[in-house]
Image (cartoon, helix red, strand yellow):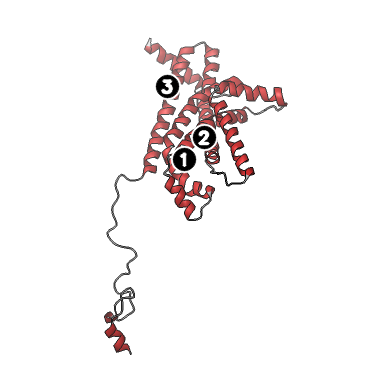
Amino acid sequence: MFAQLLSDVGSLWAKYGTVYLTGIANTLILAVTATLIGCIIGFLCGILQTIPYGPNDHFIKRFLLKLIRIILRAYVEIFRGTPMILQAVFIYYGMPYFFGISFKDIWTVSIIVVSINTGAYMAESVRGGIMSIDPGQFEGAKAIGMNHWQTMLYVILPQTLRNIMPQIGNNYIINVKDTSVMFIIGFSDFFAVHKMVSGAVFKYFPSAFMEMIGYLCLTLLASFLLRKMEKKLAGKSNYELVNTDQLVMAAGTYSYPAEAGTPFDEISKDYKGEKK
C-alpha cells in the first residue's frame, strides 16, 4: 500500500507539479507579507497603548488616549476571538453588502485579512514585551530629554524585538498553515491546489499526503531560520574584557617637558619657580 501511495504521489507530481509549486509560492508570499504588515500593526498598537498620561495632562489628551485604548482593545478582542475564515467572509462579502465596497483582487483581500488577524495577536505580544523592559530605562531616556516616541524607537523597541522574536516566528508558522482558509474566497494557495487536483483526478489521500509533507517542510525550514536569527540577535555567548583604557593618551604624545609632568598632573612648585 505504501508503494502504491508513492506511485500515486509520483504521478500527481509529474502531472501537476508546477501547479503545486505555484500554490507553495503563493502561500509563502502571503504568509511573509501578512506577517510583516501584522508586525508593523502590532508595534504601532503596542506603542499607542503604552503612551503615558496623568491627571495633570490636558483633558483632550487624556480623552484621546483613553478612546484609542478602547478602540485597540475592541480590535484585539474581535480579531482574536473570531475564526480567520469568518473574517475573510465578512470582509470579502460583508463590505459590499453593508458599504457597497467590492474587492476585485483576491490578493488584496487575503493580505488584509491575514495582516489584520496577525496584528491583533502581535499587539498583545508587543505590549507584553514593552512592559517586560525595566522601568528604569524609560526614566533614563526621559532624563536625557527623549520623548515617548524616541524612547520607544531607540531604547525600548530594539529590546522588545529581541524578546518577542519567538512569538513573531510562531505567528509566521501559523500564517503558513492558516492561509489555507483563504480558499473560501477563491485564493489559490497550496491547500486550494490540493482541493482542485484531488477533485480532478479523484485521488484525495495521495494529494493530501503531498500537502502534509509540503507544509511540514515549510514550517521546519522557517523554524530553522528563526532559531538562527534568534542566536544572531542574542549576540556572543562570552565576551572579552578590554584590558586597556582607550581614553588614556599613548606615551610620547605629550608636548610638555618630562619634568613638568602631564597635563593631568599637578605641576610641582619647583618647576614653577624655575619657570619664573
Residue at the (50%, 46%) spot, across then down:
152
**245, above or below 184, in the image:** below
Closer to viewer: mark 1 or mark 3: 1
In space, the residues marked 2 and 3 are separated at their CA atoms by 32 Å
Residue 239, percent across and down? Answer: 30, 50
For marks 1 and 3 on the same chain, the one whose residue lies earlier in the sequence: 1
Q: Quadrant of residue 247?
A: bottom left
Assign the N terminus to one quadrant of the image: top left
**Residue corresponding to mark 2:** 123
Dot 3: what SS? helix
In space, the residues marked 1 and 3 are separated at their CA atoms by 37 Å
Q: Is residue 186 visible?
A: no
For residue 130, which numbered disc appears in the image? 1
Residue at the (26%, 81%) spot, across then down:
259
Furthest residue toward front:
55
For marks 2 and 1 on the same chain, the one whose residue lies earlier in the sequence: 2
The amino acid on which the numbered mark 3 sits, given as a three-letter code, is: Ile
The amino acid on which the numbered mark 1 sits, given as a three-letter code, is: Ile
Crowding at mark 3 (Cα within 10 Å: few <14, some 14-19, many 20+):
few
For this rendering, which residue is in front, 13 or 229? Answer: 229
Crowding at mark 2 (Cα within 10 Å: few <14, some 14-19, many 20+):
many
For residue 213, which numbered disc appears in the image? 3
Dot 1: what SS? helix
Q: Is residue 244 visible?
A: yes
**229, above or below 270, in the image:** above
For marks 2 and 3 on the same chain, the one whose residue lies earlier in the sequence: 2
Residue at the (48%, 24%) spot, across then down:
177
In space, the residues marked 2 and 1 are separated at their CA atoms by 11 Å
